[in-house]
Amino acid sequence: MNPGATMPPTTDPEKAFQALKPAVLDELAEDAHRRRRADDLTRSLRAAPARARRRRTMPLVLAAGLTAAACATGGVIVAADRKDGSSG
């Protein structure tokens, strides 16, 4: 190493990263994709029904949340009514 040497400025970061990339990286990625594609497709097709089930439970969760909010509002109204001393 030469302590007085300066590095040439690189204006394009993409070129800098391409210089760091191993020559066989694309080939390795393609091989891995070919090997695992069937498993990935199977896994994604199995996961699809789980999402559909979540959609069916969403209205139930929404209804439960609205019910809880209504009960809390009713409780606040009753507590405020008792605090005022008025009976109805």
Image: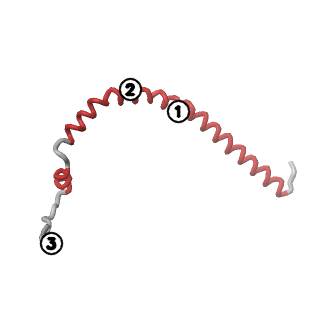
Q: Is residue 63 left or right of residue 38?
A: right
Three-letter code, disc 2: Thr
**Dot 2 or dot 3, earlier in sequence:** 3
Q: Residues within 10 Å of mark 1 (few under 14, many from 20)?
A: few
The residue type indicated by label 3 comes to: Pro
Side of 12 relative to 32 (left or right): left
Q: In the image, what residue type sits under mark 1?
A: Arg
Q: Secondary structure at mark 3?
A: loop
> Does 76 appear above or below 28?
below
Question: Which numbered disc flags the more N-terminal residue, 3 or 1?
Answer: 3
Task: Measure the alpha-carbon separation of dots 3 and 1.
Answer: 62 Å
Q: Position of residue 20 (x, y in %)?
A: 19, 52
On residue 3, the disc is 3
Q: Point out the frontmost of discs 2 and 1.
A: 2
Percent x, y of residue 30: 23, 35
Vertical arrangement, residue 48 with respect to residue 84, above or below? above
82 with respect to 5 (left or right): right
Numbered circle sitting on residue 42: 2
Residue that badge 1 annotates = 54
